Amino acid sequence: MSLVAGKDWVLNVQNGGIWKPYACARSGNFSLNTSMIETTGPGDGDYMSFKPAVHDFTAQIDGVCSLNESSNLTEADLLQLQLAKTKILCRFLQTSQDGNTYLKQAYFYLQSYTDTGSFDGVATFSISLRGTGLLTITFTPPTPPTPGDMRYPEQGSTAPATPGSYTWSLPGLIPTNTNLTSVVKDGRGQSDIILTGTPVGNEVLFEEDPSSPGNGLLTFAVPFEDIETPPYITYNQI
């Protein structure tokens, strides 16, 4: 299906060269506005005419307060960035149930921050961001398997990874009998599939599982998050 579930609308912020999700966000929005210049002339009669001028965009994130989330940014982290007037690179990623991805990426400044507490409920927060400069938009449909390619798990099935884990198992698929043609994690393909060494960046290591001979093991440079779209691979047998 081409629908996007709410949990698959994700804000990530680049921090220390790593994309980090925002912790405990429950909802968010991204808004693009185009200002208009009036061009009404004598031939327009009783109607006004306009032409588009410049774009400006904003975003807002709302959620529950949490002050210690490993590998995620919290409202405390972003408040410090706001006080320091730091420009931050953000991306808003939507992943549909059939693997399409829609990415909006731009620089933002944090414009406002509010946290709220109540005696009988959990503390909440709201953060507003103001975009600056160019907005980049990328739509990536899933890569269809080439003839002869197979998919694990099969189309319509999922084999979720464990949140916090850097690895994902491939039952019965090892480098000596399997040629991986693509590895997709959180709706995005890995740039390089390596067979030795330690993965960095967008690489993934493919090897036989040392603790489970006969089964394959993928190791990523970045751990799985509980908000991620389940991974999948395409491959053909050697």
Image: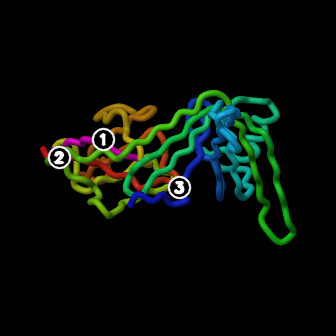
Quarter residue 122 falls in: bottom right
Q: Identify which residue is drawn at 22% across, 55% down.
A: 172
Q: Amino acid at mark 2?
A: Asn
* Residue 87 appears in the picture as rendered: yes
For label 2, the residue is: 236
User: Which of these two is toward me, 135 or 66?
Assistant: 135
For label 3, the residue is: 227
Q: Which residues are magenta?
A: 177-185
Q: Residue 184: within the magenta?
A: yes
- Give percent across and percent down for residue 63: 70, 57
Q: Amino acid at mark 3?
A: Ile
Query: What separation in Å lies between label 2 and label 1 (alpha carbons)?
Result: 14 Å
Q: Relative to 211, is 204 above or below?
A: above
For label 1, the residue is: 206
User: Which of these two is toward me, 222 or 59?
Assistant: 59
Label 3: how many Cα within 10 Å (few below 14, some 14–19, many 20+): few
**Is label 3 in a helix, a strand or a loop?**
loop
User: Which of these two is toward me, 85 or 120?
Assistant: 85
Q: Identify which residue is drawn at 63% across, 42% down.
A: 32
Q: Amino acid at mark 1?
A: Phe
Q: Please, which colouring scheme is shown?
A: rainbow
How many marks the image carries: the answer is 3
* Residue 70 appears in the picture as rendered: no
Secondary structure of the magenta portion, mostly? strand
- Residue closest to the far top: 133
Q: Relative to 210, is 50 above or below?
A: above
Q: Identify which residue is drawn at 82% across, 34% down.
A: 83
Q: Are marks 2 and 1 in contact (CB under 8 Å)?
A: no
Q: Identify which residue is drawn at 12% across, 44% down.
A: 238
**Marks 3 and 2, the one that precedes in the sequence:** 3
- Give percent across and percent down for residue 103: 50, 42
- Give percent across and percent down for residue 97: 41, 58
